[in-house]
Image (tube, rainbow, N blue to C red):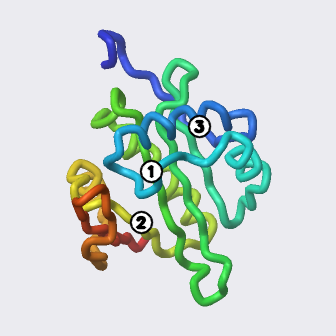
Amino acid sequence: MVGGTALRILVRALYPEDAAAWHHLQLGIYREQQWFVGDTPPPVEALSRKLLAVDASHDLYLGALAGGVLVGWLELHRYTTPRLSHVAVLTLAVALPYRRRGLGRRLLQEAYRWARRAGVEKLQLNVRAANLAAQGLYQTEGFVQEGCEARQIRQGDRYEDNLLMAKFL
C-alpha cells in the first residue's frame, strides 16, 4: 500500500513517448547520489532516440507504472558479439516511495521471460556495495557475486566498491 491504497502496478514496454517520464524518474534516482555511477541521466531526446532504436532481439525496456506514473524501469541489453550473445546486461531502478514493494521482482520476472525467449543464458549486472537492499533482491532471485571492482566509485573523498553479479537462466 502507498498512501493508504492498494498498489496496482502495470508492467509494460517503454515507448518513445515515455521518454520524458523516464527522464523524470531517472532524475529523482540520480539526485539520491547513492545508486548510479553517473551524475545526471541522459537528456529526454537521447532516451527517446534509444527507445526508437530498440532491436527487440537484443534490447528490452520495461516500465512499472502506478496510476499511470512511471515508478520503475528495467533495461536488458544483449551483447551482439557472437561469443557473448548468450549474455545480457541488466539495469533496474525503482523510485524511492515504491521500493520494497515487489516492483523490482515483477520487473525481473518479465525480464527472465523475455531473455529465455530470446535465447539469453546469462544475465549480469553491476550494483554498488552499499546497496544492500538491491543485493538482497538479486540474491533471492538467484544472482551470485562474480567479482568486485575495488574502490571503483569515488564520491568526494569516499570510495565504494562496484560488485558484479550474474544469474544463469
Q: Amino acid at mark 1?
A: Leu
* Residue designated by label 1: 92
Q: Quadrant of residue 127?
A: bottom left
Q: Amino acid at mark 2?
A: Leu
With 29 as the anchor, is 110 left or right in this view? right
Front disc: 2 or 3: 3
Q: Which mark is residue 125?
A: 2
Q: Secondary structure at mark 3?
A: helix
Residue 4's place in the image compared with 125, above or below, is above
Q: Quadrant of the N terminus?
A: top left
Closer to the N terminus: mark 2 or mark 3?
Answer: 3
Q: Residue at x 28, y 36 (%)?
A: 100
Q: Which mark is residue 42?
A: none
Q: Residue at x 54, y 70 (%)?
A: 88
Q: Are marks 1 and 3 in contact (CB under 8 Å)?
A: no
Q: Residue at x 68, y 40 (%)?
A: 44
Residue 34 in the image: state x and y as whole percent: 31, 48
Nearer the observer, 19 or 59: 19
Residue 36's place in the image compared with 45, above or below, is below
Q: Amino acid at mark 3?
A: Trp
Q: Quadrant of the C terminus?
A: bottom left
Front disc: 1 or 3: 3
Q: Secondary structure at mark 2?
A: strand
Residue 37 in the image: state x and y as whole percent: 41, 57
Q: Quadrant of residue 79?
A: bottom right
Closer to the N terminus: mark 1 or mark 2?
Answer: 1
Residue 158 in the image: state x and y as whole percent: 22, 60
Residue 97 in the image: state x and y as whole percent: 34, 27
Q: Are marks 1 and 2 in contact (CB under 8 Å)?
A: yes
Q: Residue at x 74, y 43 (%)?
A: 45
Closer to the N terminus: mark 1 or mark 3?
Answer: 3
* Residue designated by label 3: 22
